[in-house]
Amino acid sequence: MSAETGRGLAAAAASAAGRLAVRGGRLLRGHVVEIVGGPARARVILMFGGVLGLSGADSATVGAVAPQLERSLHIGNAEIGLLSSVALLVGALFVIPVGVLVDHVRRIPLLAVSVALWSVASLVSGFAGSYGTLLLTRLALGAVTATAGPAIASLTGDYFPPSERGRVYAYVLGGEIAGSAGGFILGGSIGSALSWRAAFILLAVPGFWLARSLWRTVPEPVRGGQSRLARGTVSLAGSPQPSDLGAAAVWEEDAEPQREEEDAAFAAVRRRGVEEDPRMVLAEDPQRMGVVRAVRYVLSIPSNVLLIVSSSLGYFFFSGLQTFAILFMRGHYHVGQVTAELFVALLVLGALLGTLVSGRLTDLMLRRGIVEARIWVPSACYLCAAGLLVPGLLISHLTPAIWFDLGGAALISAANPPLDAARLDIVPAGLWGRGEATRSFLRSLAQAVAPLAFGGLADAVAGIVPAQAPIGTHAPAISPASATGLEVSFLIMLTTLAAAGVFMLRARLTYPSDVATAAASTRAARAAAREQPAR
């Protein structure tokens, strides 16, 4: 065969492979769109997942470039933890006023503007000249990321029926997991190849595109669950705006069959004979409630308090793990940066699988009449994750430890979709924004404390544990004392995961009654809203 003929065959093969790849990509994309329920739903889920993905990528990037930050800025574990903590702490301070805005103004523009400001803050982080300046940029970053939780929770409640929220939250949270993976892998690789500054600068680029896409392609749904996206909906272009009363009326009329689907989500409660608590049924429009009264009401829902505590404890451990994962892996398993990043990528795949499975599983259990499915599943996930991670943290060889760590990561993430869906089930629709803001405030405080607690405890242990007697084998790039401190810190903090499972388990006693009460409050609010124009 001549060289020219060989080149021709190679070109033809490459062309055929390209066409097959394009066709395969289209088929895969079409299959994904079919799974989530149509192009319109896919667009909404992609946008919401992208917002959470940016937040996850930012937190992961701090951990991924931690070795470069330590060398460049001459700082330790406690200072690395503070970089993550300040953003979360400021976000906690801003999330309550943002929750009030979410319940009273258009949420899509609010979310788009916040994403754009987030990107600007991330961009400025890359040009920080000192640790103090970088810390200030993290303060600004925390202020603009406070919008994501309340806005996405409220919008998800309006776009999707309760019977599918576990599955939908799994898809949305999958974006957060993918963002965390990108932060770990791309951020770490860019930090190693170029600098930590380049990692922060490049992280800002997709945020500007996402803000523009949100603003231009996702419409504002009508509040109160009247804008459900039916499966198979092709376009969002015809969705009504709240200011367009005529379109809203048409949308509300078209939504009647979907309201029956919403009622079906509470059918298991009614079949069991569980009734609402008359003392907790709202006799007023939730949107007219002041912020103090709204927060007090949200915190008076028994199941909600337990879910908030459980979620905060779970995110506490995850926040510390996310910040110090790369440093821990390099020190404990005696691996380099690239191997640690690949290990994290594998854990992310496990987390994504756990998220997708738990969302579908709990929705299926709910349709089968198991009301407490969104309580039992996250509780079991937290308890089993704590048990699996103990040997994963103690074993110093990567190959056997990876299976325990993989299972633990999958279970930690699997707890989130049913837990997030459960909160929407027990809070009246008019309080979704402020309810999620209250939860985000307390959860963010726990997340903010975590990196400081993990890093401070690790540094304290490093000062008293002999470097010659570490738990595992440490890489030369990480000091043995620092690595040993992280190992002990992770083991001690595992107790928070077990506590999260216990608190979640207690919520099973009050959850059915709270579901019925929230449904009664939402129906009363809708009735009051329909009567309002006639008064």
Image: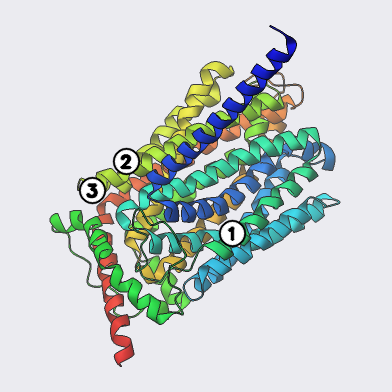
Q: What numbered label is drawn on residue 367?
A: 3
CA gap, disc 1 to disc 2?
32 Å
Circle 3/circle 1 CB separation < 8 Å: no
* Residue on which disc 1 sits: 213
In the picture, which quadrant includes the C terminus? bottom left
Depth check: give the residue in front, 479 or 180: 180
Q: Amino acid at mark 3?
A: Arg
Q: Tag 3, which secondary structure?
A: helix
Marked residue nearer the N-terminal end (3 or 2): 2
Q: Give the distance between the C-alpha atoms of the residues marked 3 and 2, in whole angstroms.
A: 10 Å
**Which residue shows up at 45% across the image and 29% down it?**
407
Q: Is residue 218 above or below residue 169?
A: below
Give residue 112's position: percent from left, percent from top.
60, 64
Which residue position is annotated with label 2?
361
In the rendered view, would you say 229 is above or below 184? below
Q: Is residue 513 visible?
A: no
